[in-house]
């Protein structure tokens, strides 16, 4: 009997051992671990070698277009309906048109935005959206240069990757379309949403934190700031929303929480990495871009591009980052496109000034 049990045990153990290799939680070695904080803090980034190589291969910046002669004619004087790139030379202007086509609509070509009978015509929504996108890119590369995108900068390709609609966009999530019956209020829970890593977390975190510009500066902060409670504190639901957002930030960048936090003291800025400060500004940048550039385009987009509640397709961290800690592996993409690193026309809607960090504990400025 005993021998039988031993044999049966051994068989079960063997099967379980083999079975675990097929489960989702199992990662195939070799593992790549990179230390990201002080020794002993366990602030490591874990990837597989194969995963890291695949990610790198999927995020290569395209070569910039051939440089052109610097002409003296300005696009605004030569063409009929140039509103943003007026002061750019005709040569640079055409070079940018070619690059924009490659970045956004390589299959469709110029006709994706243009009525080729009359290039000055603005009847296609794509052209109107693209004009605002040019302004948005200029705004990112100027206003947000020091606080986020640095010398690397962004072009249309950072988000579009050769597609008219970027791979990572989001809409307001209207929630369950069934009557919730006995549980009238589920606090946005138990709805597997990809935006929060399919966890049982509130599903509408993007609208809450990235959708509006006038969000309370302290809305993400949930940790107590005093040893003993001095006020009622925030409800647990707020902590869940914060967690949902953090899941998004981690997965967008392909990192774990310790890329920014020392998890023994999550809220403490002194023990956080410099990347956390960049991320703090990024949250404000995303609100600014959605609020000032994307949302005002709601009426410009055709109905089939809008979300279930009629809102415009908006961006989040993944739109630029696409799973990497630096988009396109940190390639300096705007160096040869000076027209994208300056504001060449009045921005229309007043560009939002980045607000000062909220009251202590504030991120140490870089
Ligand atoms: C992604 C959208 C998009 C694509 C693709 C695109 N363009 Fe444009 N094009 C624009 C926008 C936006 C303007 C207006 C820019 C401004 O107002 O500063 C414009 C303006 C122009 C003008 C000036 C027309 C006038 O008289 O006002 C020309 C010429 C032009 N584009 C040529 C091209 C060519 C050639 C291609 C293909 C190689 C092309 N464009 C592809 C968006 C696009
Ligand atoms: C920060 C990210 C980002 C950058 C950079 C960016 N875009 Fe976009 N773009 C978006 C988002 C988000 C949308 C909305 C997606 C949709 O249309 O469904 C969009 C939509 C568009 C559309 C409409 C596509 C359609 O068919 O609905 C055009 C055209 C476009 N962008 C052109 C450009 C051009 C040209 C540039 C560079 C000058 C640019 N974009 C840079 C994020 C970006
Ligand atoms: C890319 C950097 C980054 C990553 C990765 C990240 N966080 Fe954060 N975290 C921040 C920033 C920035 C804030 C402050 C946001 C603000 O104040 O607007 C924050 C705030 C928080 C807070 C609230 C702290 C307080 O003061 O109340 C918690 C809790 C938190 N993060 C948990 C996590 C967890 C858990 C993960 C992993 C799933 C994670 N974070 C991953 C950057 C990051
Ligand atoms: C408009 C595009 C864009 C968006 C949207 C964006 N980022 Fe970034 N981010 C960049 C670029 C470009 C860099 C590289 C900067 C450099 O190389 O100096 C970067 C760098 C970073 C870094 C530093 C990485 C490192 O290893 O040093 C962090 C952290 C970061 N982003 C977090 C975020 C978070 C969190 C969000 C969303 C709240 C976000 N970003 C949204 C473009 C973007």
Image (tube, rainbow, N blue to C red):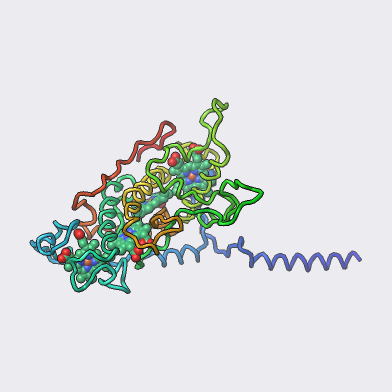
Can residue 123 be seen here? yes
**Near-viewer residue (305 or 7):** 305
Using residue 127 as the reference point, say whether residue 177 is left or right of it. right
**Looking at the picture, how far across and down is residue 307, in whole percent?**
43, 58
Query: How many labels were placed on the picture?
Result: 0
Residue at 52% of width from left, 49% of height from top?
A: 244
The residue shown at (84%, 65%) is 6
Q: Which quarter of the picture shows residue 25?
A: bottom right
Residue 360 placement, left or right of 190: left
Q: Nearer the viewer, residue 200 or 103?
A: 200
- Residue at the right extreme, as displayed: 1
In the visual, does 215 lie left or right of 16? left
Q: Is residue 257 left or right of residue 212?
A: right
Residue furthest toward the left? 72
Quarter residue 302 falls in: bottom left
Residue 86's spot in the image, x, y percent? 15, 57
Q: Is residue 3 above or below residue 252?
A: below
Quick one: 279 or 81, which is closer to the camera? Answer: 81
Quadrant of the image where one finds ligand 1: bottom left
Is the residue 39 above or below the residue 85 in the image?
A: above
Task: Tell me, yes or no, if residue 261 can be seen here.
Answer: no
Q: Which percent across, then down, holds residue 284?
A: 38, 44
Up-down relation of residue 280 to residue 107 (above or below) = above
């Amino acid at each position: 009997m005993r021998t039988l049990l031993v044999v049966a045990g051994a068989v079960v153990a063997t099967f379980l051992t083999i079975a675990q290799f097929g489960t989702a939680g199992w990662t195939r070695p070799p593992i790549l671990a990179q230390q990201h904080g002080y020794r002993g803090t366990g602030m490591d980034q874990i990837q597989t070698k194969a995963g890291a190589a695949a990610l790198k291969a999927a995020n290569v910046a395209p070569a910039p277009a051939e440089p052109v002669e610097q002409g003296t004619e300005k696009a605004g004087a030569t063409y009929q309906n140039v509103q943003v790139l007026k002061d750019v030379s005709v040569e640079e202007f055409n070079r940018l048109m070619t690059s924009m086509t490659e970045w956004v609509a390589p299959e469709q070509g110029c006709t994706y935005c243009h009525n080729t009978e009359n290039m000055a015509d603005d009847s296609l929504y794509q052209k109107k959206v693209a004009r605002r996108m040019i302004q948005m890119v200029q705004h990112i590369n100027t206003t947000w240069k020091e606080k986020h995108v640095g010398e690397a900068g962004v072009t249309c390709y950072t988000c579009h990757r050769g597609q008219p609609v970027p791979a990572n966009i989001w809409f307001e999530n209207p929630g369950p379309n069934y009557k919730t019956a006995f549980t009238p209020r589920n606090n946005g829970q138990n709805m597997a949403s990809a935006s929060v890593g399919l966890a049982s977390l509130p599903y509408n975190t993007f609208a809450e934190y990235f959708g509006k510009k006038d969000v309370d500066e302290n809305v993400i902060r949930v940790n107590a700031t005093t040893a003993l409670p001095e006020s009622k504190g925030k409800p647990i639901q707020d902590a869940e929303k914060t967690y949902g957002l953090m899941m998004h930030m981690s997965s967008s960048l392909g990192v774990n929480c310790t890329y920014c936090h020392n998890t023994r003291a999550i809220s403490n800025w002194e023990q956080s990495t410099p990347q956390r400060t960049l991320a703090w500004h990024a949250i404000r940048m995303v609100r600014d871009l959605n609020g000032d550039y994307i949302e005002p385009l709601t009426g410009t987009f055709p109905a089939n591009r809008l979300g279930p509640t009629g809102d415009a397709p908006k961006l989040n961290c993944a739109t630029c980052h696409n799973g990497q800690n630096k988009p396109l592996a940190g390639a300096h993409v705007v160096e040869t496109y000076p027209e994208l690193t300056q504001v060449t026309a009045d921005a229309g809607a007043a560009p939002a000034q980045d607000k000062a960090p909220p009251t202590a504990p504030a991120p140490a400025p870089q």
